[in-house]
């Protein structure tokens, strides 16, 4: 095993080596829980959602990706419910504050994306209600 890998620009990037202890711990964890099998709606699993932590970037990205996926699937009501239930608590800010520009400037880009998707979901739901009349 080498600690280097080639990049597209021809430069060699130094990789951080994993110690034997780290590898054995990771291997033991995998052997105890096995592979993760994802269903079509695995990201909506309550157990997964309740184990997310606000201070973990990967968990915040998980929320954003879930919101984006629901929007992409055109499940606008489900997307709005997901935002109100999980995204707002994850980011600690109410998405109804989207008009407050000073608050928005302090919020990271992921949260701004969630606010934007929320507004688009609301818009799409209003459009579909208008068309059904």
Image (cartoon, grey):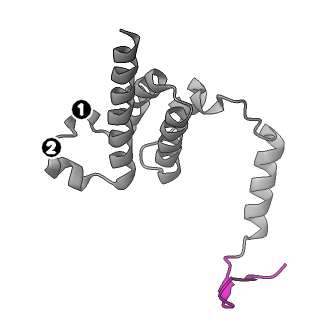
Relative to 113, does residue 95 appear above or below in the rendering?
above
Image-based side of 113 in relation to 71, left or right: left
State the image coordinates of residue 36 (x, y, percent, origin top left): 75, 39
Q: Residue at x 14, y 51 (%)?
A: 102
The quarter holding residue 33 reads: top right
- Disc 1 to disc 2, C-alpha distance: 9 Å
Circle 2: element type: loop
Relative to 82, does residue 10 appear above or below in the rendering?
below
The quarter holding residue 118 reads: top left
The residue to which callout 2 is attached is 100
Residue projecting furthest to the top: 133
Q: Residue at x 46, y 46 (%)?
A: 60
The residue to which callout 1 is attached is 96
| Residue 27 within the magenta-colored segment of the rendering | no
State the image coordinates of residue 123 (x, y, percent, origin top left): 33, 29
Highlighted range, magenta: 1-16
Circle 1: element type: helix
Image quadrant where one finds the N terminus:
bottom right
Image-based side of 11 in relation to 50, left or right: right
Q: Residue at x 22, y 40 (%)?
A: 98
State the image coordinates of residue 19 (x, y, percent, origin top left): 74, 70
Question: Can you see residue 94?
Answer: no
Q: Main secondary structure of the magenta part?
A: loop
Image-based side of 29 in relation to 110, left or right: right
Question: Can you see residue 111?
Answer: yes
Relative to 64, does residue 123 appear above or below in the rendering?
above
Residue 18 or 63: which is nearer the viewer? 63
Residue 26 or 15: which is nearer the viewer? 15
In the rendering, which numbered label is found on residue 47?
A: none
């Amino acid at each position: 095993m080498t600690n280097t890998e080639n990049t597209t620009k021809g430069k060699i990037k130094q990789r951080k080596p994993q110690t034997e202890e780290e590898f054995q711990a990771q291997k033991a964890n995998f052997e105890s829980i096995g592979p993760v099998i994802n269903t079509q709606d695995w990201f909506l699993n309550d157990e997964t959602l309740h184990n997310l932590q606000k201070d973990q970037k990967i968990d915040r990205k998980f929320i954003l990706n879930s919101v984006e996926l629901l929007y992409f699937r055109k499940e606008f009501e489900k997307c709005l419910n997901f935002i109100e239930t999980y995204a707002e608590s994850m980011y600690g800010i109410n998405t109804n504050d989207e008009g407050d520009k000073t608050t928005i400037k302090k919020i990271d880009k992921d949260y701004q994306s969630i606010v934007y998707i929320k507004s688009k979901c609301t818009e799409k739901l209003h459009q579909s209600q208008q068309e059904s009349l």
